[in-house]
Image (spheres, rainbow, N blue to C red):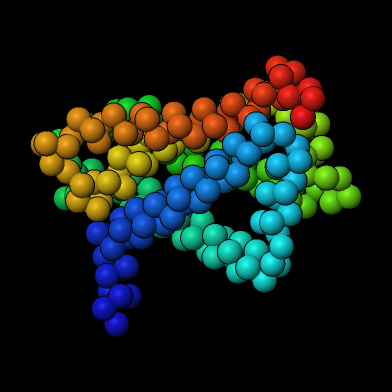
Amino acid sequence: MWFVKFVASSIGKKFVMAFTGLLLILFLCVHAAGNAIIFFGSEAFLTYAHALHAVPLVVVLFSSGLAVVLLAHICFGLYLFFENRTESDSRYAVSVRTVKYSLASKTMHWSGLFIFLFLIFHLAVFTFGGKDIPISTLVEERLGDFSFGIFYLISFAVLALHLSHGFWSMLQTFGVNHPRYNDLIHNLTYIVPLFFFVIFGGVTLYFLTGLGANF
């Protein structure tokens, strides 16, 4: 089957990584938009949360699909990581921008592992924990805690670091590489991670600094 052969190839694995990465970025966009509703007050956020879970079947299907995408991204990422360790030269190397010695590129596997562990913690706290507590109250209590809030800020910083290289890598895999647009692409590798850090980190700071005391 051509698809199996394609996925088994080096470029196929990189494409799967890029495609699943794109889907995860799109999820982050939706999640960031949902989190931003917090700034409009607890009532607006509760209305959004209830609407989001109004159709359980859709929630299950979406969550299952997201889990498959995430696991595929992790598995192919690990495979490529160990494969690259055994190859000193890559035929897929792109010479337009040198990222070999950037902090983000050198720590992709570690930042990815950190994000995965953070995700498990996040789900344990907000999805499976405190089921009898309104989500707005749970968010206010958890993010208002100093240790909890600082941990979340660090986690979002690691996410931004991971995205700074991952976003560029994804664009290169999709062939988005042209002298006319390289400056824009370079800027986007900082703008996109910063956008998510500002939204997610801003929500954390909103409660951590006490600005959300009347939430």
Label tally: 0
In this orientation, which residue lies closer to the viewer: 4 or 211?
211
Q: Quadrant of the C terminus?
A: top right
Observer-nearest of 200 and 151: 200
Q: Is residue 158 visible?
A: no
- Which residue is pictured at 10% across the width and 36% down the height? 179
Residue 57, given in percent of the width and then of the height, sits at 67, 71
**How far from the left and from the top, in percent, is residue 183?**
20, 30
Q: In the rendered view of the protein, which quadrant contains the N terminus? A: bottom left
* Image coordinates for residue 103, horizontal then vertical, percent: 38, 27
Residue 118 falls left or right of residue 98? right
In percent of the image, x 51 and y 30: which residue is there? 197
Figure check: 41 above or below 61: above
Please state the horizontal and vertical placement of residue 28, each as a whole percent of the image.
51, 45
Camera-side residue: 14 or 86? 14
Q: Quadrant of residue 73?
A: bottom left
- Eyeballing the image, is 147 above or below 117? above
